[in-house]
Image (tube, helix red, strand yellow):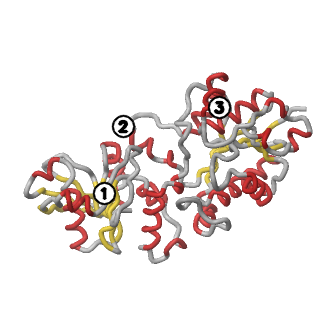
Amino acid sequence: MSVRAIGLLSGGLDSTLAAKMMMDQGIEVHAVHFNTGFCLTDNPDRLRQSPGDLVRHDALRAGERLGIPVEMIDIYDEYWDVLTKPKHGYGSAMNPCIDCRSKMISVARPLMEDRGAQFLFTGEVLGQRPMSQHKEAMKTIEREAGVAGFLLRPLSAKLLAPTIPEVRGWVDRARLVSYVGRTRKPQMAMARETGLEEYPSPSGGCCSLADKGFATRLQDLFAHRPGGSEERLERTEIYLLKTGRHFRISDGAKLVVARDDGENRFLHFHRRAGWRLEALDVPGPVAILTGLPSEEDLTLAASIVASYGPGRAHGLVRMGVEHGGQASELSIAPMDRAETNRLGVHRNKSRRDQTGASIQ
């Protein structure tokens, strides 16, 4: 009997290893990747690349290394209720991990029949994620997704009850493993042994919603929208939340300031999202002011932008402003760096902004 399985492939080390383990047992793997709109890798690669560079998603890279096709499935529209009304609540930030996992697996379940597969598998590791990867949460996910017995987790299988694929002999349980906890050292050793030399950082998760800085920005955006979280965000709004330094200028306006050339290009490309600001006579960042700013808001935003780059040493900086295809300019004194710092502009080693009193 030819056995086929649907594998959820994020492109990270764990899911890639799980797929490789299934392939090594002679199982035909059909990989799927679900795009919620909140994956960390959705746009940062585009920000860091030079113009003309080819950018590929981690899941597609993993599929290429494994020699299998990857079906990319967008679930952004149906994911909104998972994000804003999670039955099982949030983790440490705005990550609805149990509901998220249940949604993905429930979408994957009908694919078994459609793609002629006998079971599903994931790269989950027992105890690795505190909210969704303990035994009770795993059972809840299986039950709510309607796949009890048909969901295999190869990397922790020997610590879990045998699944139907193991009982029926489709998968040799003896060749599965019993990884547990947050360490990735066993996975890294397996990758070396099996020849999977290239993979993203093994310790990094993919979900922006688990990042407290991103979650604070998202909550701030909901708090200043007439429809709150009921009003679904446009994709561009999500991309902007992942980019640059963020300042809440007023209830009606928010400023995003680029941190490097990649973000400069990105914000210039999305300049129609608001008012584009950039110093005219000295190097400096591109910034986008979104919302419905007043003249006072625009002046404050321009002074913040002027404080970055060599313009901060000048008494006045000539600032270009573009909106709706119309260009104008103003001369503005750069905000004092102590005042900018007081507003909460911080960067850490991971390049994710930490939050302060007025930064989201």
Q: Which residue is mark 1?
A: 345
Side of 81 where 280 appears, left or right: left
Q: Amino acid at mark 1?
A: Val
Q: Residue furthest left?
A: 315
Reading the image, the residue beneath label 3 is: 186
Taking the image as shown, residue 171 lies to the left or right of residue 38, namely right
Characterize the local packing of mark 2: few (<14), some (14-19) or many (20 or more) Cα atoms within 10 angstroms.
few
x and y percentages locating residue 37 in the rendered image: 54, 54
State which tag comes first along the sequence, 1 or 3.
Answer: 3
Q: Quadrant of residue 153?
A: top right
Q: Are marks 1 and 3 in contact (CB under 8 Å)?
A: no
Image position, residue 48 (x, y; %) = 39, 40
Say what amino acid the circle numbered 2 marks: Pro
In the rendered view of the protein, which quadrant contains the N terminus? top right
- Of the pair 301 and 126, the residue shown nearer to us: 126
Mark toward the start of the polypeptide (3 vs 2): 2
- Residue under label 2, please give it: 51
* Residue drawn 43% across the image and 62% down it: 217
Label 2 secondary element: loop
Mark 3 secondary-structure assignment = helix
Quarter of the image where the C terminus is located: bottom left
| Vertical placement of residue 355 versus 55, above or below | below
Q: Earlier in the sequence, mark 1 or mark 2?
A: 2
In front of the other: 9 or 188: 188
Residue beneath the point at 62% across and 67% down = 81
Q: Is residue 245 left or right of residue 112?
A: left
